[in-house]
Image: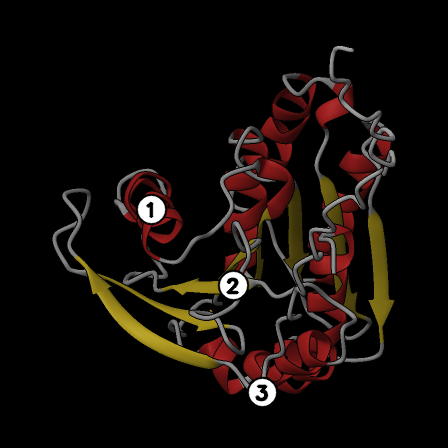
Amino acid sequence: LPSRTPCQPPPPTSTPFPTVIPTPTVTPFVCDETSGRIEPYILESSYQAEPFQYRIYLPPCHAQRPVACYPVLYMLHGQTYNDDQWERLGIGPAADRLITSGESAPFLIVMPRENDTYGDIYRQGFSYALLNDLIPLVETEYRACSTRSERAIGGLSRGGAWAIHLGFRNWQLFGAIGAHSTPPFDGDLDKLPTWIQAIPPASLPRVYLDSGERDFFHSESAAIEEVLTRNNVPHEWMVFEGAHEEPYWQEHVEDYLRWYASEWDS
């Protein structure tokens, strides 16, 4: 008889266990710094004969923080003062408090110096240097955001007049404008409606105005507010106790920063 190969039972069917790929653990960024720093710099500009000086506030852990970009506030000083005014008023510690508490996203503050605070605004190079030299530099060197919604401009007294002048004329650049104790530049009150009409309604900037009750420029600040109201520009108008003096601005500097940063994601 022919030989036969014994039947072998089929091997048991088994379903292999799937390979489990562990989920990588993401270590959250923790900033161990409680204060930022303010640094002075000089920028050579072809728009003015003298060097363009500015100070910049860098938030805690600026270099280490893993963010794509930082919102930035351009904050302008008053007449007869220079780029150290906002620093003396406590803008650095005020920003530290908002950022380290988590109330605000980390942001930059740029404080440029206007060399001639009595000069004709149309015959000096300050505005051109700020718009064409300083803003591009800040966005390149400090990871500042380049979207208008995350770029704001503000100032006190003459600096506020600059904020109104530059912010509305260059609305594509600034999503928020703040003018604190501000008399407008000569002629700007008449031009403001034309600037506003050139802005698409959906692109109107956020606007904040404030003045002390005893400020000798209070009526001029109120006149700006009246133009905004007549032209249907949404804005905040705050009147506080106080005069046209540094103790007034120092008292409100943290409120100013809270408003500027209010729409920047924390």
Q: Quadrant of residue 218?
A: bottom right
Mark 1–mark 3 distance (CA, rounded to whole Å): 46 Å
Numbered circle sitting on residue 120: 1
Judged by depth in the image, the label closer to the viewer, 2 or 1, is 2
Residue 248 vs 122, above or below: the answer is below
The residue under label 2 is: 108
Residue 238 vs 61, above or below: the answer is above
The residue under label 3 is: 32
- Which quadrant: the N terminus? top right
Which of the two residues, 21 or 36, is positioned nearer the viewer here? 21
- Which mark sits nearer the N-terminus, 2 or 1? 2
Amino acid type at image mark 3:
Asp
| Left or right of 80, for residue 145 | right
Residue drawn 35% across the image and 77% down it: 39
Residue drawn 74% across the image and 61% down it: 266
The local secondary structure at tag 3 comes to: loop
Residue 181 vs 204, above or below: the answer is below
